[in-house]
Image (cartoon, rainbow, N blue to C red):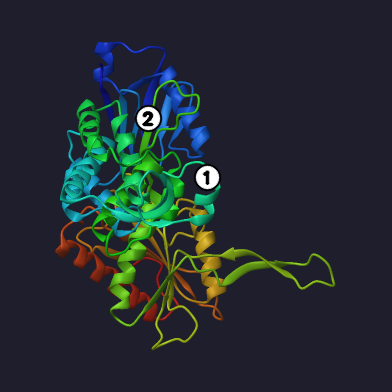
Amino acid sequence: MNLRRITVPEYDTISIVPSLDAVETKKSKSISEQEAKLVNAFQKRSGQTFFNIGLQMLATTNWVGSFSIGYLCIDVIPKIDTEKPLAMKNLLQMVSAGGVEKFKHTDISCLAKTDTPLITAFLELYINNLRKEWIRGPIRRYVSEEANRFFLKGKIIFSRHLRQNVFHHERFFTASDEFTADNPVSRLLKAALNVCRAYPLAPHVSTQAKKLLCLFDEVSDERDAAKCLSEITIDRTTFRFQYLINLAKCVIERVSPWKQSLKVPVYSLMFDMNEVFEKFVAAELKRALTENGYKVITQSATRYLATRDDSPQLKPKRVFWLKPDISVFNPKVIQGRPACLVDTKWKMLRILENEEFRPNKSGDSREPVPQADMYQMYAYAHKYKCPVILIYPHHSGLPLQKQPLASPFLKYDCGDEEEPYTIVVCTVDITIDLVRARERESFRWSLLKLVQDIGQAPSRADESHV
């Protein structure tokens, strides 16, 4: 068994070669043409573009995590200016804090192990947590069962009894409540365990899953996991399994291989960094601002860009709704209108090496902020009539040193004297250890200070560079 692992950052490339040589493969980042075809087939069926596939190159995108093809695992790590273990820890913390997937703080360090692919560590984590809880006692519930028995148990259903036992006076058709572990929650946990059992990249994970499946003999196999999820309710009997239910849901929805017409199993545990970064910043802003009297709403569209007249008799139709990532309201200052809007972009601001930074230069086509982003922010500022904060991740190429974790970088005046609204471009530093409570608290305080300064400041910008 030739297990292979490739670790690459975002927006990097992997070579595609006709065939793999055992010696050269270990030294280079390359996959075979057959493996590239499997990646392409998986992406077409799943509808997600984890990689851009060319003739001789496979390029990573803004999706990070683990992607497994048979005995090959590709780990894509976020492009953060820090060491790989901390980058992976911060990724998982952002995923958990933003609600994309929920992980315990004690489990994040286990998942970020450098010697283990993320997808392998995740499946192993699920098995270990399930074993501990199941040994404490499985979930048992009373389930009503109807059966034609040779003994009297429960209550007789006379209509069925008379119809089926006319010539069998020794039988009784009864309904009784059975205290059993065969219920939707247990079937979901077993379905996720079967996914772990079939995982080819780590034999020890498959072995652990097979051993644990012996404790699920009385639980029936579930083919429709989506049906199981719809039937699950969290109450006092299932509360201690809530974390495991979330992990099992992740295994079923994210990790389970796509089996249709693929010769080898393909597993994926990938996260869209655009979504992760947006939800992480929104969650931290909400935690920081709600404690200080602000109201934070995410993905709320109350303004539109234009109207369309379909016919003179009909009312004009509102089109192109504007939906900012985060809307911040200060009820003490302004009623009904946002104090500011916050939008996040998982991009690196364009600062070229050895180039003089001149943001005030008229007609400069080399502004750090992409033009499309500015168009979008201008529409927000113009329609919502409030300042807009555009947040990017901080990186080492920016001409900033020893700034707060969230700090203004550029300020643009996007209006005239009648509408003097500003777009403030900011960066946030996510190279700190986000798993530590003190670091997270500093991060939130920095976001709070940023919103307070910009949301309450005069909207006319005297300078374009902060």
Give the residue at x 37% y 50%: 184
Quadrant of residue 286 within the rendered picture: bottom left
* Image height of 133 relative to 255, above or below: below
Between circles 1 and 2, the one closer to the viewer is 1
Q: Quadrant of the C terminus?
A: bottom left
306 over 188 or under it: above or below: below
CA–CA distance in space, label 1 to label 2: 69 Å
Residue in front for this viewpoint, 145 or 239: 145
Is residue 30 visible to the viewer in this orientation of the structure? yes
Q: Which residue is mark 1?
A: 164
Q: Which residue is mark 2?
A: 13
Q: Is residue 122 left or right of residue 333?
A: left
Measured from the top left, where is residue 453 in percent x and y? 33, 77
The amino acid marked with disc number 1 is Gln
Q: Secondary structure at mark 1?
A: helix
Q: Secondary structure at mark 2?
A: strand
Q: Locate residue 245, reporting x and y percent.
A: 31, 51
